Image (spheres, rainbow, N blue to C red):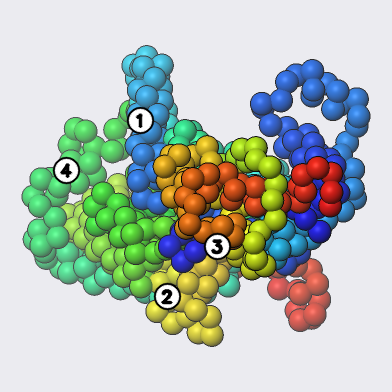
Amino acid sequence: MTPLQFETAHAPQWDELQAMLERAEGSPARKRADRKADKKKGAIDGARLSVLYRRACEHLALAQARAYPIGMTQRLEELTRRAHQLIYRRHEPGFGIGRLRRLVLVDIPQSVRAHRGYLLVATLLFLVPTLLVGWACWRDPGFVLHLMDADQVRNFDQMYGPGPGSIGKPRSADTDWQMFGFYIQHNIGIGFQCFAGGLFGGLGSVFFLVFNGLQGGAVAGYLTARGYSTDFYSFVVTHSAFELTAIVMSGAAGLRIGHALLAPGRRTRLAALRHASADAIVVMYGVIAFLLIAAAVEAFWSSARWVAPEVKYGVGAACWALVIAYLGWQGRPRAAIDAKGTPDAG
Amino acid sequence: MPLDTLTTAETPEGIALPLRPAGLVPRFLAFAADFGIRIVIFFIASIALNWGGGLGAGLQLMVYFLLEWFYPVVFELSLRGATPGKRMLGLQVVMDSGLPVTPAASIIRNLLRAADFMPFLYTFGVLAMLWRPDFKRLGDMAAGTLVVHAGTVELHGALPDAPPRPPARALALREQAAIVNWAMRAKRLTPARFDELAVLAQSATGDEGTREDASQRLLGVAHWLLGRRGDGAR
C-alpha cells in the first residue's frame, strides 16, 4: 500500500476525529456560528470518539512502521495526542464543595495520622529547642541576647510589657485587618518554605523547625522571667493551637519527602520522591487551613483586650483539645471501626 | 534521533506520544513575562485598595500572598494548562504521561518553587534544568510534571510537481523516507542545498554522472514512492 492509498482510505476518519476534537475542546478559534451549530448537534458521541481514537492509534503505528511521510505521521501524532488528553483526562472533581468536604472531614486528618512517625520527629525537633532555650532564658534573661539582638528584645518588652504600645492596648479594627493580611502572607509563606526545604534531604525542614523552636522558646522564657507571662500566654494560647501544629505538620511533610530521597526503598529516588510528595501535599492542605485559622484568631481574638485572660486560657485549651481530637480521631471510616470492633470516638 | 530533546509518553494503546520539553530560555522568558504581569496586577490592586486604613493594607498583603504562591496554580489548572507568560511562549504544563496537570501536582510544583529558589534567584532550579535532558526543575521532579512546547513545528510541506518515475533500484524503508522527507522540505531548503542533497542521492535515480536536473529526477522518485504512477498506470 502506498502512502497515497493509505491516506485516501483513512483520511475521512481522521477528518471526523479532528472535527470532534475541535468541538470537544471548544477552541476559541472557532466561530460563534459554529458553536451554535454544535449545540444543535448535541453532545459528542463518546463511543464514536474512542473508536476513531483507537483507529488513529493503529494508523499512527502503521505509518511509523512503514516510514510514511513525516507530514502524515505528524498529523496523526497531533490527533492522537489531543484525543488522548481528552479521553484520559482524569475527571477529578477539582476543588468543588464535595472535594473540600472530603478533604476536611477525611483526607487531611487521615494523612496526618499516616505521617505520625514524621510528626513525632518534627515535634521533637521543634519542642526540644523550645524547652531548652526557654529554660535557659527563664533562668537568665540575658541569655536571650545570644539569639536575638537588643532591638528585637526591646520590641518584645514593649509589646507585652505594661508601657504604651503594648499588645494589650486597644487597637482599631483596621489594624486587626492589616495584621490578618500580614499573618497570612508571612506565616503561610514560612509553612510552605518549611515544606519545600524538605527537598534537601529534610535539612531545610529541620532548620525551620529548630529555628522557630529556638525563637519561640527564647521569647517565652524571657518574657516569663520578666514577669509578663499573663500578657504573653493569654495572647498566644489560642492561635498557637493552630499555628504551632501547622508548623510541625509542614515540617513533617518536608521530612517525609526528604526521607523519600535519602531512603527511597524499593523505588528509584525520583519515583519515591513523586510518591512521597503526593502523600505529603495532603498534609500541606491541612497546614494551609490551620494557618488561615491561626491568622484570623491571632488578628481578631488574641489581641482583643476586652477579653479577660481567664477566658482566653479557657478558649485556648478548648482549641488545643479540638485540634488534637480532629487530628487524632476525625475521618475514620465506619467500616474500619467496625472491623476493629472498637468504635473509639468516631 | 538521540540529539533531540524529545521525550515520549506511552499511551495504553501502545503508541508513543512525542513530548517536546521546553528548555531554560523559553521558560525563563515565560517566567519574566509572568513576573511582569504579577507586578502590574499587584500595582493595580495596591492602587485600588489604597483607601487608607488597615483593611486595605491587609487585603494588599493577601493579594501579594496569592500572587506569590497561587498565581501559577490557578492558571495551570485552567483549560490551557499555562500561565499567561507560558502561553505567550507557547508552553504548557502537563503530567509526565502527557495528560493535563492535576490540581495536586500543580500545587506541589508551585510550593516546591521555594526549594528551586534556594539559595538565591532559582539557582537550584536552573542547575536542575540544565542537568536533566527533560529540563525539569526540582518541583517538576517531585510533582511528575513537564513543561512542554504546546504546538508542533511544521517543517514539511507539499511536494513540488515533477513527473513520477520509478527508482533505479530497490530502496530500503529508511531511504524511501529520506527521499520523501527531502522532497517535502523543498520550501525550507535553499535551491542550492536542495540540489546538492539530490546529487548525493543519485544512486536512487540511476543515471549517475549528470548533475543537472538531479533534483527534478529525485522529486519524480519521491512522487513515485508516494504512490503516483504518472499516466494513470499503477
CA gap, disc 4 to disc 2? 41 Å
CA gap, disc 3 to disc 4? 88 Å
Q: Chain of mark 3?
A: B
Q: Residue at label 2?
A: A261
Q: Residues within 10 Å of mark 4 (few under 14, many from 20)?
A: few
Residue A65 in the figure: left or right of residue B7: right
Q: Chain of mark 1?
A: B
Q: Amino acid at mark 2?
A: Leu
| Dot 4: element | helix
CA gap, disc 4 to disc 1? 37 Å
Q: Which mark is residue B36?
A: 1
Q: Amino acid at mark 3?
A: Ser
| Dot 2: element | helix
Q: Residue at label 3?
A: B203
**Residue under the point 64% across and 51% down:** B222
Q: Residue at label 4?
A: A155
Question: Which is nearer the eye, A308 or A264?
Answer: A264
Q: Residues within 10 Å of mark 2 (few under 14, many from 20)?
A: many
Mark closest to the chain's N terminus, 3 or 1: 1
Whether residue A137 appears in this view of the structure is yes
**Residue under the point 52% across and 37% down:** B187
Dot 3 and dot 4 residues touching (CB under 8 Å): no
Q: Residues within 10 Å of mark 3 (few under 14, many from 20)?
A: some
